[in-house]
Image (cartoon, coloured by chain):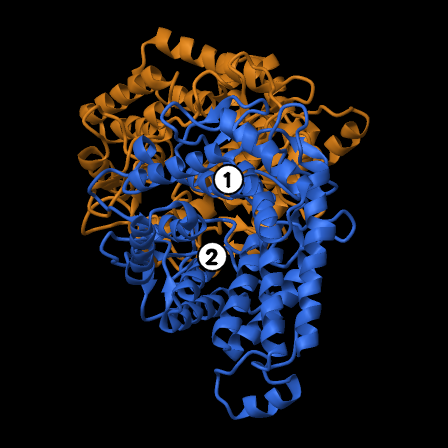
Chain colours: A orange, B blue
Amino acid sequence: MRTSFVQQAQLYRRALLDDVLPFWERHSVDREQGGYFTCLARDGAVYDTDKFLWLQARQVWMFSMLCNRLEKREAWLQMARHGAEFLRRHGRDAEGNWYFSLTRDGRPLVQPYNIFSDCFAAMAFSQYALAAEDEEARQVAEATYRNILRRRENPKGRYNKAVPGTRPMIALALPMILANLTLELEWLLPPDVFNQTVDACLRDVFSLFLDEERMMLREQVDPDGGKRDCFEGRLINPGHGIEAMWFMMDIAERRNDRALMEKAVEVALRTLEFGWDRRQGGVFYFLDAQGHPPQQLEWDQKLWWVHVETLIALLKGYRLTGRKACWSWYRRVHAYTWGHFPDPKYGEWYGYLSRGGKILLPLKGGKWKGCFHVPRGLYLCMREFEQLAAQAGAGRVAPAGGEKKTAAGAGETSRPGGEGTP
Amino acid sequence: MRTSFVQQAQLYRRALLDDVLPFWERHSVDREQGGYFTCLARDGAVYDTDKFLWLQARQVWMFSMLCNRLEKREAWLQMARHGAEFLRRHGRDAEGNWYFSLTRDGRPLVQPYNIFSDCFAAMAFSQYALAAEDEEARQVAEATYRNILRRRENPKGRYNKAVPGTRPMIALALPMILANLTLELEWLLPPDVFNQTVDACLRDVFSLFLDEERMMLREQVDPDGGKRDCFEGRLINPGHGIEAMWFMMDIAERRNDRALMEKAVEVALRTLEFGWDRRQGGVFYFLDAQGHPPQQLEWDQKLWWVHVETLIALLKGYRLTGRKACWSWYRRVHAYTWGHFPDPKYGEWYGYLSRGGKILLPLKGGKWKGCFHVPRGLYLCMREFEQLAAQAGAGRVAPAGGEKKTAAGAGETSRPGGEGTP
């Protein structure tokens, strides 16, 4: 068992270091005008030069994070600096809000209507401040974070199209991302801000967005958590729900809260069972909680990030709780993901597949896919397997042969190592 | 030939009168709270009760138009009145702008950010004013039309997310819809307003949005007509372009402008050649002019309205110019459309198919599909075939047998009747 965990860790490490990161290093750097190209064709050719804040910031975060947590490579630091300088120069309006997109040379295209630009910018500058030991970057991260907290009651501001009062609803995305962001920024936040914000995110996710009966998250609910029978209220985004659960597992691990771990794993598994396409494999993009037609025409497509986030959640859940269902689902999602998304010819992963698993768009990057979910997922899965291997080596996991026997009569929960290897 | 035109007219008439209109009469009326349900499942069951202005208005237009142009049925007038009263009571804000959506009981949900709500409301009240001989409805139509003209330079108003000045672009949708709307409202407009607006729409469509080399319309261009190499600038929506061309053919017919007819037909055919899926049939929803991946994940889907609008354009083009290519394309699109969209079991048509022609969503109505494109298309195709039959009966079309011989040596353009029947 330990051997196969080690092999799995190596699979993810090689894909990260030998395939995915080099793809972005080779193709994404705009050496003339700064920042990154993210609209990359199958072979890495640039097909559009607009610069989307989410993706610029996420790439800065990615290379900074690797410097901080994997290896202090000068090339990675340079890569991060290249994007951070561009963002610092061009990314914000006069009030310090982050634009949504810029032209190639950094002129603002789309207004700061989207608070997630700010969230990813704060993540980016926080990691970059650590990697580059850059005090100004730390200040950018902190100021941006405070601005997010200030804006969070009305994140869309004047771009909000809802008529006030008729049907106020709140969205899962913000508390979910804020939970992850707050863990990321812990080192630069006062402890009371850190604890209060994490507490608030936990409360929002589990007492407002969670449908307790079905143990799945809704994307939008009433401000008091009411589940409303309208398109927005019925919407389930399985990838989102599952990603949110590994953010919650991170909090649970940090607080050593076993009940929270179990709950987060349960929600992830229930969401995956609901979201899995039993006929053609893969996880759907959008579903209606009551089985009605969703508004989103792309509902049945299979997206890279949904599958990557699911792998992370299942491995974390397996390591933290030992639930066999995490491992058996991991094997199934692993087989689908590795069988469909990587492009062995030109490197990196496809992003968008049809329901049947065929390539819907041949791009490696675009307006929403950049240097983020794939490498982050590869890094995190690698780390999970390294820890699983260490646990197994330390005798905390029974060897595969012995495990199989005990697992047979052990009910659904067991320690890591059951049910073979992926 | 004449016989088969008559048979085709009957096919469309029966589908309209015996299938599609009864479906909406049976399932869409909200007898308790007014207005129409448009979110209808395959069998007509209501799965959501929100009321979207586009669809409320279009259904009022549809039944009013049939009263005015097909038959003065009391039931149709009642149906139109049912929606018109709901809209008159609940549809507008204090400045007379039309909301985007309302709750079932008429409370405003989404602000008037979308000028097409106003366009369809103006169309609706204009036809309803004629059908019901209702002076107040005429005033609503006229005031709404003037408000559209006033807002057209900045149709999104404060909801516009583009940073002013960086990359101003204008959208095809407004001049295209305005052209159709202005023809609809001619009876209530001063002649100078009518002529100036139609002239402006023609100028915008053909001198700004048309790519002269490829004879296709872009969805968005620079204000001076420049074709820009960005996602929005490269976007082609074949259904939109083809629909715009039958609006232009209507103008050409009204003005008896043969050059305009020929040009509109040429653009429709070139767009259809570009938009047709040579592998799996049907017309794509979105394409990139340069073949890059479009942003729209639904790009390869086959939508009902695209195909219905294409049938209208091809038949109008055939009747007006006699181009054989219109007829041969009509046969191909007819076969695809009638082979894929109608639901013989529960009536009406499916709206959304996957690239391969399978049902993507089983709905008959939703947020964007209502009682509009299918019945309007059935009505207009019926009328085209009636006119073609009349032309053939009056000896203006050669009989099919004789036509085939002459057509062989006659080049691409011929009078209606060539190439067999659909």
**Camera-nearest residue between B244 and B301:** B244
**What is the number of the mark on residue B129?**
1
Q: What element carries label 2?
A: loop
B346 displayed left or right of B87: right
**Chain label for disc 1:** B
Mark 2 vs mark 1: in front: 1
Residue B117 is situated, as x and y percent measured from the top left of the image, at 45, 37
> Which residue is pictured at 49% across the width and 49% down the height?
B297
Give the residue furthest to the top. Answer: A192
- One can see residue A278 in this view: no
Q: What residue type is labelled 2?
A: Pro
Q: Is mark 1 on a helix, strand or loop?
A: helix
Q: Which mark is residue A155?
A: none
Q: What residue type is labelled 1?
A: Ala
Residue A187 figure quarter: top left
The vertical placement of B53 against B358, above or below, is: above
State the image quarter where residue B202 is shown.
Answer: bottom left
Against B82, is A283 above or below? Answer: below
| Residue of label 2 | A362
Packing grade of label 1 (10 A; few <14, some 14-19, many >=20) is many
Q: Are marks 2 and 1 on the same chain?
A: no
Residue A329 location (% of width, % of height): 66, 36
Res A257 quadrant in image: top right
Give how far across and how far down residue B180 sits, in percent. 43, 52
Q: Which chain carries label 2?
A: A
Q: Residues within 10 Å of mark 2 (few under 14, many from 20)?
A: some
